[in-house]
Amino acid sequence: MTVLFGVFLLTLIVITALAIVQTQHLFVAVILAGIFSLLIAVIFFLLDAADVALTEAAIGAGISTMLFLAALTLTAEYERSGSANRLLALGVVAVTTLIMIYATFDKPRLGDPAAPVQQHVAPWYLEHTPEAIGIPNVVTAVLASFRGYDTLGEVSVILTAGIGVLFLFGAKPRRQSGPQRIAPHEPGRGLRHYLIPRVVGQLLIPFILLFGLYVQFHGDYGPGGGFQAGAIVAAAFILYALLEGEAQILRVLPQRLLTGLIAGGALLYGAVGVAGILLGGSFLDYSVLAANPITGQHIGILLIEAGVGITVTGVLISVFHALAARGSV
Amino acid sequence: MSLLLHVSSWVLLSLGGAFVFIGGVGVLRMPNLYTRMHAASLTDSMGAALIIAGVMLQAGPSLAAIKLAAILLFLLLTSPTATNALASAALLAGLRPEEDTSSPEECGE
């Protein structure tokens, strides 16, 4: 049954991908990309990768669609038909496809217990997580503690991306010379004149924030963690910005505070690592943070997940602000 | 009792599936945006509600049933709102419902 669902979903993914390539209308492409991400999230879920599925659904289908739409208000509606190097592109794609198909011949069967991925380090993690970290969700243990360096790298990537976007778009917006608005209401007022979306949105925002906090702090026990929680909290703030207007959200969360959050989250992560060194362990070794090594691991994971969540929230909201200040969102 | 639960659950699931199917057909066959939205909202409201009710009967009195009820509540709040926002956006963009229905050549699309 799972295989049948998998084949069905993969077929849908291929169709969606072809439709994205085919369409010239950028808005359609963005919506299709959101559908694409949602389908991938369902496949991840079918493969029992709940953490990754949650990330893909929150970031891929949710936030990035939102940011793409915000970016679309700054550009044209249709793709320019470029004819340069069509044959070269086709050649590269064909060769890559052939190599990938060739590579699948050596791939072990799906879920094969003898496959290298199940035999290499996975058994060690599964065996040692209860005694070394003491949390039920092995994914969080691997992500936050065993492979803490990798996650620090990911946070740095997000930090760098945020800084890049702020550099590109953060300069003084030129509101007067920007594209003309079609909507009748004044710029930056959001959907204030529309009663139903406002009422329902305001009803839902507290619950979205609560769910974000749940995903953040329940990451040790179930699927979740800083990345997903950051995306969900950012989505709540962006929804508020859409409903009440940019000016209102900037009053709640000014850009200076956001910049502080972006840097502060990554700094918190780094500081936990340095604290490990100062207390006599190695960098990002949480065992020395408390008298009991397992309690130390809990504190360390809680802090670095908070750092990840803060940075992700700050970057996503900042990127939205940067795009919205230029366009007419 | 168990048989009754199963039968009613499957009836609900099939009815929900039928509503989703009708909604899908409607989106493809309806002549303009507003009628298409009407068809699509069938999937969101009736289809989703019946399917979730069917799954709730399968889940029995458990935490899963409460979660499903929360999802249902969320869907019942958001999908009509989304439909409303979509319709007012279309109206703002200048798509008049009565103009659209008067052009029969659009029906083929």
Image (spheres, coloured by chain):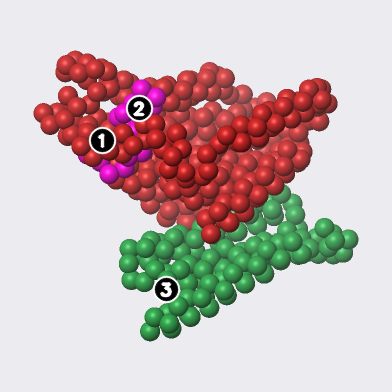
Chain colours: A red, B green
The residue sitting at 31% across, 39% down in the picture is A126
Q: Which residue lies furthest to the right in this view?
A: B105
Depicted B48 relative to depicted A63: above or below: below
Q: Is residue A239 magenta?
A: no
Find numbered disc 1 in the image and state the secondary structure of the residue it sits on: helix
Depicted A180 relative to depicted A281: above or below: below
Q: Name the residue under label 2.
A: A147
The residue sitting at 64% across, 62% down in the picture is B40
Chain letter of the residue carrying label 1? A
Find numbered disc 3 in the image and state the secondary structure of the residue it sits on: helix
Q: Could you tell me the amino acid type at mark 3? A: Leu
Bin the neighbour count of mark 2 within 10 Å (Cα to Cα): few under 14, some 14-19, many 20 and up: few
- Do marks 1 and 3 share a chain? no
What's drawn in magenta, residue-wise?
A: A133-151
Chain letter of the residue carrying label 2? A
Bin the neighbour count of mark 3 within 10 Å (Cα to Cα): few under 14, some 14-19, many 20 and up: some
By secondary structure, the bulk of the magenta-drawn segment is best described as helix
Q: x, y (%) of residue A254?
A: 41, 30
- C-alpha separation, residue under disc 2 versus residue under disc 1: 14 Å
Direction from residue A24 to residue A312 in the image, left or right: left
- C-alpha separation, residue under disc 1 versus residue under disc 3: 40 Å
Chain letter of the residue carrying label 3? B
Q: Could you tell me the amino acid type at mark 2? A: Arg
Q: Which of marks 2 and 1 is in front?
A: 1
Q: Does the magenta stretch include residue A135?
A: yes
The residue sitting at 47% across, 20% down in the picture is A160
Bin the neighbour count of mark 1 within 10 Å (Cα to Cα): few under 14, some 14-19, many 20 and up: few
Q: Residue furthest left?
A: A291
Q: Name the residue under label 3.
A: B57
The residue sitting at 43% across, 82% down in the picture is B3
Which of A284 and A179 lies nearest the eye of the viewer? A284
Direction from residue A16 to residue A253 in the image, left or right: left
